[in-house]
Amino acid sequence: MRRPQRKAKRSSFRREQSALRTIVTELGPMDPDGLPEDEYDCLVHHLLSVLHRGTRREELNQEVESHIRGHFGFDAGVSSQTAERIAGATWAWWSSRPPTKRGDA
């Protein structure tokens, strides 16, 4: 991959990361006031990874819930409700993006 391609891919990833961070921060289980900007980066990176691998909508909810329970330690009720909100908004955002060629970010 040439330098311009790598640069474009990094730029695209940063835009995706920023958009997804906004979704997760707004819908996450913790009050966003006073949270460090990178509080949910582990979840954001995980979601971008599974989205780029081609996860299905029904799997996305499970991915979010598992991460909220396992990493942040929220109980099943909170994590289930939060996961549904985040997964729904994430899927809507991901599905509305313009199609990219395989290998593009």
Image (cartoon, helix red, strand yellow):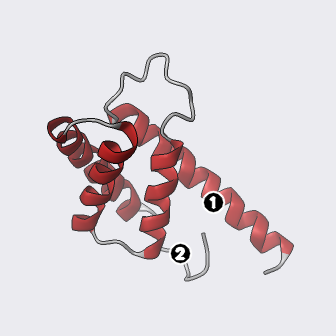
x and y, in percent, of residue 12 in the image: 63, 60
Quadrant into which the N terminus falls: bottom right
Residue sitting at 53 percent across and 43 percent down?
41
Residue sitting at 55 percent across and 83 percent down?
102
Element type where label 1 sits in the image: helix
User: On the rendered structure, is 64 left or right of 25?
Assistant: left
Above or below, 34 against 104 in this view is above
x and y, in percent, of residue 3 in the image: 85, 72
User: On the rendered structure, is 7 left or right of 18?
Assistant: right
From where the camera sits, is residue 64 visible? yes
Please state which of residues 71 and 43 is positioned toward the viewer in this rendering. 71
x and y, in percent, of residue 95 in the image: 36, 64
The residue identified by callout 2 is: 100
x and y, in percent, of residue 82 in the image: 24, 40
Mark earlier in primary sequence (2, 1)? 1
Please state which of residues 73 and 84 is positioned toward the viewer in this rendering. 73
The numbered disc on residue 12 is: 1
**Amino acid type assigned to the residue bearing label 1 in the image:** Ser
Quarter holding residue 11? bottom right
Above or below, 77 against 57 in this view is above
